[in-house]
Amino acid sequence: MNIYVSNLSFHTTSEDLKTLFSKFGEVTSAKVIMDKVTDRSRGFGFVEMSSEENGKEAMTALNNKEIEGRALSVSVAREKEAGNGGFSRGGSSNKRW
């Protein structure tokens, strides 16, 4: 089961995330997403657990739990939506070419 965790402290590491979730069962991977430019945490991450039952138990127990002064938001991870990978240039749609 793949789990999305947000509102993480910027000091939380992937190892911290793994330790937190491993209390509920086997964690196959845990990753805090880092900013490519600053190499700082972006405040969210993903945890993959081997058992769906353990994953649901962890989500119930940890959602809204305060860790390092921040209430975690824990939910089932969704697949990345196609077509939203680029930047919008914005501006007026009334341009004449």
Image: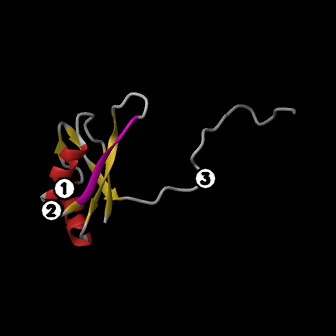
| Residue drawn where x is 22% and y is 72% of the image | 53
| Residue drawn where x is 15% and y is 57% of the image | 22
| Residue drawn where x is 60% and y is 38% of the image | 87
**Amino acid type, callout 3:** Gly
Is 53 in the magenta?
no
**Amino acid type, callout 1:** Phe
Q: Residue 97: where, in percent of width, then height?
A: 87, 33
Is 31 in the magenta?
yes
Q: Residue 33: where, in percent of width, then height?
A: 35, 43
Q: What's the distance in space between the residues labelled 3 and 2, CA to CA?
A: 35 Å
Is 83 on the left or on the right of 69, as rendered? right
Q: What's the distance in space between the residues labelled 1 and 3, CA to CA?
A: 32 Å
* Span shown in magenta: 28-35
Query: Badge 2 is on which residue?
Result: 24
Quick check: 51 above or below 42? below
| Residue drawn where x is 25% and y is 45% of the image | 14
Is 69 on the left or on the right of 45, as rendered? left
Q: Which mark is residue 83?
A: 3
Magenta: main secondary structure:
strand
Secondary structure at badge 3 equals loop
Question: Which quadrant holds the N terminus?
Answer: bottom left
Secondary structure at badge 1 equals helix
Query: Badge 1 is on which residue?
Result: 21
Secondary structure at badge 2 equals loop
Q: Residue 76: where, in percent of width, then height?
A: 34, 61
